[in-house]
Amino acid sequence: MTTGSVHFRDFDSAEFLREYWQKKPLLIKSPWASWSNPVDPDELAGLACEDHVESRLITQSDPEWELEHGPLPEDRFERQGKAPWTLLVQAVDHHIPSVAALLDCFRFVPNWRVDDVMVSYAVDGGGVGAHFDHYDVFLVQGLGRRRWELGGLCDENSELLPHSNLLLLADFEPTDEWILEEGDILYVPPRFAHRGTAVGDDCMTYSIGFRAPSRAELVEDWAEDVADQMLDQDRYTDPQLAQQDNPGEIGSEAISQLHSMVTEKMLDQGSFMRWFGRYNTMPKNPDIDWQPDILASADDIRQSLVEGATLIRNPASRFSFVREPQSSILLFVDGQCFSCSGDEAIFAENVCASARLTVEPDASQPTLDLIAKLFNQGSVALDL
């Protein structure tokens, strides 16, 4: 499948966001202008054998479940028994352009929310069991058929089966059931119980998942960033200390001052914005960095553009931006922050919107300098 063929024929994204997003599941019958499976099973199995790729092999030996983490030996599938099994490979979009192209159809959700595309391959009866996720997911049927059963909402009190690595529901009562054909999509909001089972061999499903940081994660990482920027001599003082009736009491004035010392920094929205941009764009697979052997200068970038080079984003890189006053922009790429204005800001917006971008050779010097920085850190490349 070429990247140009990946788009929806008939899908109202505004209606979807209004009526279904994070509200209720939706079966979307093959909305593609055309559909062909983006990656074949052998290529997926090959990825599961590589060291830098996260993969899992789940085998069902009723009532037991066996989980094996990759990288898998090349002959692993030849030794697989008759029990139903499923191969899961994470972040396939970071390795295969045709899989990354699937994400273009889901850009009605902001890029910063996108996690990755997990691809599963299962033989007849294979699946990962009844479970629920804390994030939204679009389940695209790529090859073969899969039966999806959906249940009610779950939470931290939902009983799980006693398995140390698989978080499977102990009590699953399906309320809806569909069999997805090739090209069909099932949207499942967070916390809805669901179970997918392959109907026949050669069943492939593309799970487009979205990031949903927990409050605890945000507080922990934000507080750590704030603390790293503080001076050790910035300490509590009480020059107006008065004698207390009971030395064991922590007085209200002390509590108020201590609380203010913490919240004053934590409530700085500007600092939070800069931290979150860096935090949210940290690469999931930093090994896929495209860093050149020889660093490029802005003049090198200009010469490549003169020769007709096109700028392409590393599919493993994350790009986001935040608007600031006076039309300036903070561009965040792979955990780095770049302050942009003028033509440079226009470029920053465009590179966040498009995986492939044509840049004119007469681009401004700040724009060329920025492209050189992104090129040298492995976030973009020039395709002639």
Image: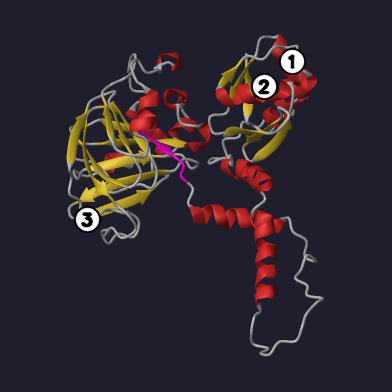
Q: CA distance from mark 2 to mark 1?
A: 9 Å
Report the number of discs: 3
Residue 382 found in image quarter: top right
Marks 2 and 1 close (CB-CB < 8 Å): yes
Q: CA distance from mark 3 to mark 2?
A: 54 Å
Q: Residue under label 2, please give it.
A: 347
Q: Percent from the top left, x then y, of residue 259? A: 65, 66
Residue 64: numbered disc? 3
Marks 1 and 3 close (CB-CB < 8 Å): no
In the rendered structure, does residue 210 fall within the stretch colored magenta?
A: yes
User: Which residue occupies the foreground of this view, 186 or 83?
Assistant: 186
On the rendered image, what quadrant is the C terminus found in? Answer: top right
Asked if 82 appears above or below 219 in the picture, the reply is: above
User: Which residue occupies the foreground of this view, 188 or 48?
Assistant: 188
Q: Residue under label 1, please give it.
A: 363
The kind of secondary structure the magenta stretch mainly shows is strand
Three-letter code for the amino acid on which mark 2 is drawn: Phe
Foreground mark, 1 or 3, reads 1
Disc with the residue nearer the chain's start (2 vs 1): 2
Disc with the residue nearer the chain's start (3 vs 2): 3
User: Which residue occupies the foreground of this view, 273 or 53?
Assistant: 273
